[in-house]
Amino acid sequence: MSKVGVGLIGLGSISTWGHLPGYMEIPEECRVVAMCDQVPGLAEQEARAHNARAYTDYEECFKDPEVEAVDLVLPHHIHAKVALAAIEAGKHVLVEKPFTTTVEDAASVIAAAKRKGVKLMVAENTRFVDAYGVARKLLDKEVIGPICYARTYIGGSEMPRLSDPTNWRSKAATAGGGVLLDAGVHSFYLLHWMVGPIKSVQAFTTNYLPQLKIDVEDNAVGTLKFENGALGNFSLTDTTEAPWTEILELYGLNGSLKVDMVAERPVQVYSTKQRSNDSSDWWNYYGDTGWNEPFIRHSALEWKTNSIRREVQEFVRCVADDQEPPVTGEDGMRAVAVALKAYESARLGRRVDI
C-alpha cells in the first residue's frame, strides 16, 4: 500500500501535540509531506524537523502533487474557505471542529466534496474516545433500555487564551462564537450519537468574566428535546479551574450509564435488565444490580490526545482504503446547526426548533 501524502495546514498547539503525533505513529501508512502556516518561521521550523516542505500560502501547498490529503487546523471562520479551496484542488479534507460557522457554508463544502469525489471528514475526536465507544456498545445491547434523560458537561480553563487579545479565539469575528460553538459541538454530536436527533433547544449564555474584554460567551447551559421524546441538558464552561474534562450521563428505563473522563475507570453502568420480577426474592431483585465498571484502558490526562491521534489515523485509512469517514460533513453540519439554534434561543429567550 502506498503512503498517503498529508499536508498539515495550521501549526498551532492542537496541530503539533495532537494531529502531528498521530500521523507520526503510522509511518508505514502516511507521511506528512507539507506543513503550512502564515507564520514563516514556524512553518520552516516544523517542516525542517519533520523532513517536509514549508509553505506560508495554503493555495501554494494545495498545488503540491505529493499532497493527497490535507488536515485543516485553522481559526473557525476560515474553515469553509480553505476546505473549498482544497477540495477544488482535488485534495481529501479533514477539517477541525466546528466544521464551519454557518449551515450554509457547511452545505457548500459537503456539496463540493461530493462533486469532486474526495473524502471529507470532520475532526470530531469524540467518536474516537474509548469510553464513549464502550458506552455506545452498551446501548446497542440495550443494557439501560430506552433513554429518557441525558446530560453532558464540558469544562476547564481557557482563560489564558481568552485573555490574550491577539488570540483569535477571543474574538467573535474569527472564532464564530465562544464555548457554545467551540465545545458545544462535541456535546451535540455525542448526544445525537448516543440518544438520537435533537428536535429543539433552549439555551442561556453569559460572559462571566467581562474584565477579559472578549466578545464571545465563556459559559453556556441549555435544555434539549430529542425527536424520540427524551430530554437533555448540556453545560459548557471555559472558566473553571479544574482538569479539562467531559461528563456524559444517560438515564434509561432499565438503568443508567455514566462516563467521567477524569476517572481512571471512566465508565459506570447500572442495569436492572436481568433483575427478577419477584420482589420477595430480595437478592435477585436488588442485590445484583449495583454499579459495574467495564474495564477499559484510559488515562485521565491523555484521553483527549489519544482520541485525536486515532481520529487522524482513521482519516488516513479512509483515504487509503476508499472508505466513508466515520464522522461526515453531515455530522459536522448537524452539530453546528444545533449550536447556532442555541445562540438564537439565548438571544430570543425561548425554545427554538432545530
Image (cartoon, helix red, strand yellow):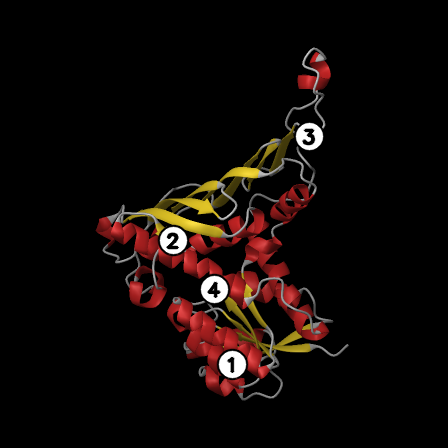
Measured Cα–Cα span from mark 2 to mark 4: 16 Å
Q: CA distance from mark 4 to mark 3?
A: 36 Å
Residue underneath mark 2: 353
Seen from the viewer's position, the closer of residues 64 and 124 is 124
- Across and down, in percent, residue 48 comes to 56, 77
Asked which quadrant contains residue 120, the reply is: bottom right
Q: Which residue is mark 1?
A: 86
Q: Secondary structure at mark 3?
A: loop
Of callouts 3 and 1, the N-terminal one = 1
Badges 2 and 3: C-beta atoms under 8 Å apart?
A: no
Check disc 1 and give the amino acid type: Ala
- In this view, which residue lies farthest toward the right? 1
The quadrant of the picture occupied by the N terminus is: bottom right
How many neighbours does mark 1 have within 10 angstroms: few (below 14), some (14-19), or many (20 or more)? many
Q: CA distance from mark 3 to mark 1?
A: 50 Å
Residue behind mark 4: 333
Disc 2 and disc 1: Cα gap in Å?
34 Å
Q: Position of residue 57 (x, y in %)?
A: 44, 83
Q: Are marks 2 and 1 in contact (CB under 8 Å)?
A: no
CA–CA distance between discs 1 and 4? Answer: 18 Å
The percent coordinates of residue 249 (x first, y second) are 53, 38
Q: Residue at x 60, y 88 (%)?
A: 65
Residue 330, horizontal then vertical, whole percent: 52, 65
The nearer-to-camera label among 2 and 1 is: 2
Nearest to viewer (mark 2 / mark 4): 2
Q: Categorize mark 3 by other alpha carbons within 10 Å: few (<14), some (14-19), many (20+).
A: some
User: Which residue in the protein does label 3 denote?
Assistant: 273
Q: Which of marks 3 and 4 precedes in the sequence?
A: 3
Residues at discs 3 and 1 in contact (Cβ within 8 Å): no
Query: What amino acid is labelled 4 in the image?
Result: Met
